[in-house]
Every structure is written in structure tokens, then in C-alpha cells.
Amino acid sequence: MQRLTQAPVVPAYHMKANRGDRIFQACIYVLTILIAIVTLYPLIYALSASISKPINIMNGSVWLWPVDLSFQAYKNVFASKNIISGYGNTVFYAVCGTVINMLLTVMAAYPLSMPDIKGKSFITILITFTMFFSGGMIPAYLNVKELGLLNTRWAVMLPGAINATNMLIVRNYFINSVPGELREAASIDGSTALGTMFRIVLPLSKSILMVVMLYYTVSHWNSYFEAMMYLQKASDKWPLQVYLRNILIMSQMGDMAEQAGVDDINTKLIYEALKYAVIVVSSVPLLVIYPFVQRFFEKGIMMGSLKG
């Protein structure tokens, strides 16, 4: 006679826990969707405004999708020699500046991660001190002036050649994520400290290096204050963000003129459309680069942020 097997009884608290988990997951999904909408809407609006007729932007007809499709703003952008020159300068500062940043960051982080370096704690404290206190804008300007860097490209790249926070993150990653046994084995095999860095430490630290590299690149790409302060007599070396700032100021001046009763509608329409087109053009490279670097973020930044 076949025995009937009774299904196991699931305790009530398991059912409550499962129901609570489902509610929690639903809340997470709703929150994620809301955050995605809040994040994506400005990007979609800027793109839609850049390919709409300016009059529709001013009267508020554009709020999500383009209205009266027009690519005249992009024609104006790529026809402007100043904007094209600024775009090239921005690419130059982002590439060359990031190379300098990464070289100096690794050169500082690697020795401070070695266990047999004397005085590294004191040096680390000095570097950390600069994260909380700085000389200020006027001493920085006088320093750049006395070094003869004013109105040169070096004035944009050298003052921020190394970031203390990024350097400490890389240092902590070297300490916590690269096994000390590998360094000892390399030393026993006759490898120099420099050889160990290039053959062992750096290949095992690709994730944090990619994260920090993206940080530096974004910082250079969005930077305008240093160029505005140090390149006052060298407008041919201005990055794109300085021209974008000038366009935004001209657009605001158009609003102020309208409030004062001076109506120059054509100029205002031109700057209104140009503003969004330049924003889109300046944002595209970073939006293209980010998906390729995103996979390094979770591992890199979490491990590099551990206390070393």
C-alpha cells in the first residue's frame, strides 16, 4: 500500500518574512524608477530642447519631446570656430591632464603602500592635512604667476596635478587588495620595487585605476574656473566649459534685458538654442565612456575606500 507523504508545514513567520521581502523589493523597484526618472529627465529635456525651434523653448512648449524639429543649433555650434577650438582644448586637457594625474597618483600611492618605508605615516598625515586646509585662491594665483605659468596650458593642468583623496584611495587599494605574499615572492625572485609595481601591483589594480582615471577625466572635462582665472589673456586656450559659461551668461542677460523692457528676441533665441546644443555636445563623450568603466566601480571604489 502506497504511503502518502505529507507536505512539510511552512511556519507562519516564513510566510510573513516572504511577504515582507516582496513589499520591500516592490518599494526598491518604485524608488529606483523614481530616481531614474529624476536623473534622466534633465538629459532628455536638454536633448529635446537642442533639436527644437527656440521659440518653442521660450514659450514652454518643450517639456519632454522635441517640438518643430530643427538642427540649426548644432549647425551653429559646429560652425563656430571658438566652440570647436574650445572642444579641442577640452579634449587636450582631459587626456594630458589625466595622464599627469595618474602618473603622480601612482608614484605617490605605491611607496606609501610599501610596509618597509620609514616615515610613511607622517607623510600620509601631511597629505591628509591638505584635504581640510588649503592656501586659498589668491595664494594659488600668486604661485602660478611666480612660476611663469599664467596664460599657458600648464596653468590648467599642473595646479591640480594630484588629488589627495584619489591618491589615498589608490594607496588603500594597494595595501588591502594586493597580497603582500606576491610582493615578497617577487622580491625573492630578484624583482626590483619598480618591477614589482609594473608587473604585479598595477595589473591587479585595474579596477581602482580605472575608477580614479574616470574621476580625473570628468574633473578636467567639467573644469572652467582654472582656465577663467589663469588664461585671461589666452582665449585661444579656453576649454569648452568657459564658452558654455559665457553662453549661459548671455542667455541670462537676455532675460534681464527683457525684464527691463529691452526686447532683442533674435539674439535671445540664438543663445537659448545654442545653450542646449553645447550642453549635449559637451556631455556626449562622458556618456559614451562611462558604460565601459562602470563595471570597475563597485569593486574598485569599495575596496579602495577601506581603511589601510
Image (cartoon, rainbow, N blue to C red):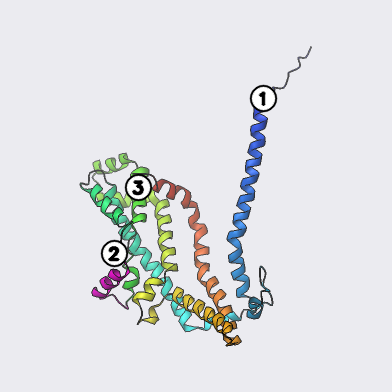
Picture layout, residue 163 above or below residue 28: below
Distance from disc 1 to disc 3, alpha carbons, whole Å, reads 46 Å
Tag 1–tag 3 contact (CB < 8 Å): no
| Place of residue 50 in the rendered image (x, y in percent of width and height, measured from the top left) | 60, 74
Q: Name the residue beneath numbered marker 1.
A: 11
Q: Amino acid at mark 3?
A: Asn
Name the residue at 54% across, 81% down: 256
Q: Name the residue beneath numbered marker 3.
A: 172
Q: Nearer the viewer, mark 1 or mark 3?
A: 1
Distance from disc 1 to disc 2, alpha carbons, whole Å, reads 65 Å
Tag 1–tag 2 contact (CB < 8 Å): no
Q: Quadrant of residue 140?
A: bottom left
Q: Quadrant of residue 51?
A: bottom right
- What span is colored magenta in the figure? 135-151
Point out the image quarter for the N terminus. Answer: top right
Q: Earlier in the sequence, mark 1 or mark 3?
A: 1
Secondary structure, mark 2, is loop
Point out the image quarter for the C terminus. Answer: top left
Residue 195 visible in rendering:
no
Distance from disc 3 to disc 2, alpha carbons, whole Å, reads 26 Å
Q: Earlier in the sequence, mark 1 or mark 2?
A: 1
| Place of residue 6 in the rendered image (x, y in percent of width and height, measured from the top left) | 73, 19
Q: Residue furthest right?
A: 1
Q: Earlier in the sequence, mark 3 or mark 2?
A: 2
Picture layout, residue 45 above or below residue 111: below
Q: Name the residue beneath numbered marker 2.
A: 135
| Place of residue 69 in the rendered image (x, y in percent of width and height, measured from the top left) | 67, 77
